[in-house]
Image (cartoon, helix red, strand yellow):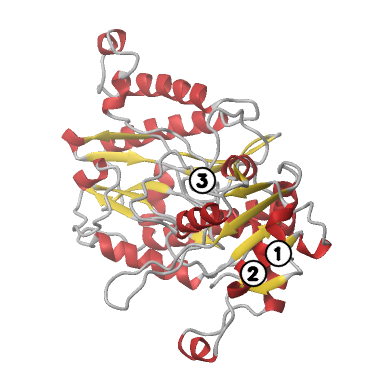
Amino acid sequence: MKYTAIDSNLFIENRKRFAARLKPNSLALFVSNDIMPTNADGSMGFVQNSDLFYLTGVDQEQTILLIYPDAINGTQKEILFVRETSETSAIWEGAKLNKTQATQTSGIKNVQWFHHFDQVLQSIIFQAENIYLNSNEHTRRYIDVETAEMRFNKALTAKYPLHKVERSAPIMHSLRAIKSSYEVALIQHACNITEKGFRRLLKFVKPGVMEYEIEAELIHEFVRNRSRGFAYGPIIASGASACVLHYVENNKECKDGDIILLDVAAEYGNYASDLSRSIPVNGRFTKRQKDVYNAVLRIMKAATAMLTVGNLIPEYHKAVGLLMEKEMVDLGLLTMDQIKNQNPDMPAYKKYFMHGTSHFLGLDVHDIGDFNRKLEHGMVFTCEPGIYIPEENLGIRLENNILVTKDGPNDLMKNIPLEAEEIEELMNS
C-alpha cells in the first residue's frame, strides 16, 4: 500500500456497529478477495474485499475475519486470520503483516495464522446458532467468475449444513451508507489528489495531444501523492467519443475545437473520489459549447442543493429531470410538444441525458446503499448531470462529490475549478 496508516479506531468502531446488528449467539465471517490471474504466471494488482477492509483495514490476500460477540471465551469475540510469511515468500514477495502489525492495523488483539482457520473455527462454531456470511449484493453487479467469497461460502455451508445462515450484506449496506468522520477525511483526501491531477492537465492540454497522454499526466500526479491510481477506469473522451458514456479506449487525438469529457479521479486508502469535467481542447469554449456547459452547470448546482437530509433519491431524480427538460428546450434540443406527448416511462430528455444524476460513493465508486432510504447526515453522493448531443459531437458532464450533512450539502470538490470562465483562464494562463 502507498497510503499512510489509517487510524485503527475507524475499524474498531465499524466492527462494534456491525456486531450490534447481529442476532443473539451469531458468528459472522468475512474473507479477502483473490489475487486474480492474467496469463502465464502473471496476476492483476490486488484489490481487497471492501467489506473486509471496512471492518479490519487489512489490505492483503488470505485474510479472514471472525466476529462472535456472544462467544463464551472473551478472546474469541474477534479473531483475525492473516497469512504467515515464509522465508520464500519474504524473498520473492516481501513480508506480510505479522501478528503485532495486524493488531496495530485492525485493533483486533487475537490474531491467528490463516492456515489455522479451519481448526479454530471448528472449536467455536458449534456454540453459535447462526452464521452470517457475506456476499456481493450490489444491484449492478456482474460476476462471471467464482470469487473467493463464493467458494468460501459454498465450502462452509457444505461443512456445517445444520447451522442457520444469515446474510451480512443488508447490514453492510446500511452501515457503509453513513460515513464516519474518518471516512469523510479519506474521501476528501482522494478528492484533493484528484484536484491536483486536474489542475496539472489544464496546463497540459492543447490541440494535438493524445487522450492517453492526458491519462499519463493524471496517473503521474495521483501516484506521486500516494494514491494507488485511478479509482475506476479513466474516461478521457474527446469530440464524438464524449457521447459514449463508458468510453475507455483513450487513444484518439484531441483536436482543435473539440471538447474533452473527463471522468477521472483518484482513490486513497481504498476510498474513491469521482470527478467529471468537460474542457475545450484549445482553451476556449465556443458559444454553443458554453451554452450547453452552463446549462449542465445550472442543473448541477440545483441538484446539489437538493441533496439534503430527508430527501429521497427517486424523487430527486424526477426533479432533476424537470430541470433537464427546461434546459433542453432552451437549447433547442426538445420542443414543448415533445415533452407534452412523451412516454412517462421514457421521458424525452432521456435522448440527451441517459443516466442517473447521483450514486453512493465510498470504498467503491458505485458504493453500496439503499436508494429508497431517506438521505441522512453522513451519506456521500456524486452529483453528475450531463447533456450528450451526438449530432454535434458534443458531450458535457460535470460531477462533484457531495457530503450530506444536517447543515446542508457539503461539496468535497468545491476547490476544483468548475466555472467555464475559470477553466478558460487556467488553460490560458
Q: Nearer the viewer, mark 3 or mark 1?
A: 1
Say if residue 191 shows up in the picture.
Answer: no
Are there few (<14), some (14-19), or many (20+) residues within 10 Å of tag 3? many
**Dot 2 corresponds to which residue?**
119
Q: Position of residue 353 (x, y in %)?
A: 32, 30
Residue shown at 75%/45% (left/top)?
20
Q: Position of residue 52 (x, y in %)?
A: 59, 58
**Dot 1 corresponds to which residue?**
123
Residue 89 is left or right of residue 128, and the answer is: left
Kindly identify the amino acid type of the residue bearing the numbered disc 3. Asp
Label 3 with label 1: CB-CB less than 8 Å: no
N-terminal of the two: label 3 or label 1? 1
**Dot 3 corresponds to which residue?**
367
Label 1 with label 2: CB-CB less than 8 Å: yes
- Tell me the quadrant of the picture where the C terminus can be found: bottom left
Residue shown at 40%/34% (left/top)?
385
Q: Is residue 300 above or below residue 123?
A: above
